[in-house]
Image (cartoon, rainbow, N blue to C red):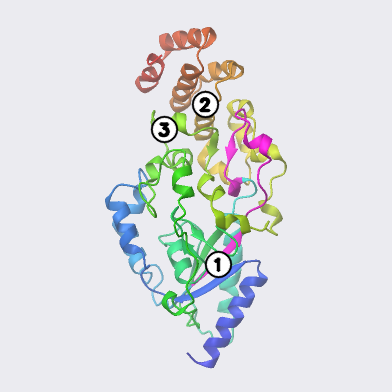
Amino acid sequence: MNGSTAQLGRHLRERARLLGFNRVGVIPAGPARRLDAYLRHIAGGLHGEMAYLARPDRVARRRDPGIILPGVQSVVVVGLDYYTADLPPDLAADPSRGRLSNYAWGVDYHDVLTPRLETLAGWLRGQPGAGEVGSRVYVDTGAILERDHGETAGLGFTGKNTMLIDPRRGSWFFLGVLLTTAALDYDPPPEARPEMPTCGRCTRCLTACPTAAFPQPYVLDARRCISYLTIELKGWIPLDLRPLMGNWVYGCDVCQEVCPFNRFAQPTGEAEFYPVDWDTAAPPLLELLALDEMAFARRFAGSPVRRIRRGRLVRNACVAAGNWGSQTAVPVLTRLLGDHEPLVRGHAAWALRRIGGEAAHAALVAALAAETEEAVRREIAAY
């Protein structure tokens, strides 16, 4: 390492913090240290229907970042806190409201982190002596194992819930990655740093998971994870898992809420991550069930929720309504039996079956007579 490299690296870290990033680490480009664990995850089918994770070209890029950016020398990993507050206990315990993961309470984090990383990359390209600098930025979108690189860069340790945990401030933070062909000074590798605190004997996240999505510590079976089921899964939610999902309609925070390290979390200074009001963080299920395409687009403009589109959100709200079990939801669920999306009709039928009662039974009988989609008929006929 020469003086100019050290100075450039120091200035880059300063610039990253000026851009609002709470954490920054720099490591030499290379394979992710936990790549073997990732490959075992894929081989075991634990990624569910996220087939893109197993594509050979994606795996090759995770093994060699030089495929993504020829000549890459450095990986800059940044973190940005997003914790705002705990949901008020009365709302958290209210089954008539849908639960959204804390990270989805405000604006889409991609729209916050990506421009800042692009700005950081542009700053780096403009530095004297940097030469012709190539760069790529990623925020949860590329063939990069962000958490693995974040651990190597010293931003935290991998917890038993597979989250990257900063022992000083917990796990409520987003990650972003900047690949660059610039040579920088690097943070010490893990073996050369003081040992971080770890989970120790704690298993709170493993035992608290509503769907038992952790077959063992440090292993997540996405097929059982509520975040996967409500966001990534595009089709039918497995019948045996629906009753276990409670009122989560977008993501799940249980394994983070119970983590002792998160008692150190400090509210973020990023105003964009705060909810406009508590109805944004925990919307009434009846309102979600009544959303049409235009109302969905208006309500979730600028939110990460818009990525799953109206159909999947209403599907999730149907499951939550079934778990709520109130007759209050029967009229709107009955209307959804005529929805244009089979996925919505089928999950509305399941909710009505779970709620029960004469009105729900009559609605299902009428719907069965008119329904032509076989998958939906199976949901209705199970009554």
Q: Is residue 327 magenta?
A: no
Residue 68: which quarter of the image?
A: bottom left
Mark 3 crowdedness (10 Å alpha carbons): few <14, some 14-19, many ≥20: some
Where residue 151 sits: x, y (%)?
Answer: 46, 67
x, y percent for residue 65: 38, 69
Where in the figure is residue 144, as x and y percent of width and height?
A: 42, 62
- The C terminus is located in which quarter? top left
Q: Quadrant of residue 223?
A: top left
Q: Please identify, in this view, whether the residue under mark 1 or under mark 3 is nearer the observer.
A: 3
Q: Are marks 1 and 3 in contact (CB under 8 Å)?
A: no
Q: What residue sits right under mark 3 in the picture?
A: 241
- Which residues fall within the magenta stretch? 76-104
Give the amino acid type for the residue marked by disc 3 in the picture.
Leu
**Helix, strand or loop at disc 3?**
loop
Three-letter amino acid code of the residue under disc 1: Val
Q: Amino acid at mark 2?
A: Asn
Residue 26 position in % (x across, y down): 50, 75
User: At 69% from the left edge and 40% from the top edge, which residue is drawn?
Assistant: 88
For residue 98, which quarter of the picture?
top right
Q: Which label sits on residue 133?
A: none
Q: Which sits earlier in the primary sequence, circle 3 or circle 2? A: 3
Q: Earlier in the sequence, mark 1 or mark 3?
A: 1
Question: On screen, 212 above or below 37?
Answer: above
Residue plotted at (40% across, 40% down): 224
Look at mark 1 in the image and give the residue it sits on: 78
Reading the image, the residue beneath label 2 is 323
Asked if 272 appears above or below 248 in the picture, the reply is below
Q: Residue at x 64, y 28 (%)?
A: 287
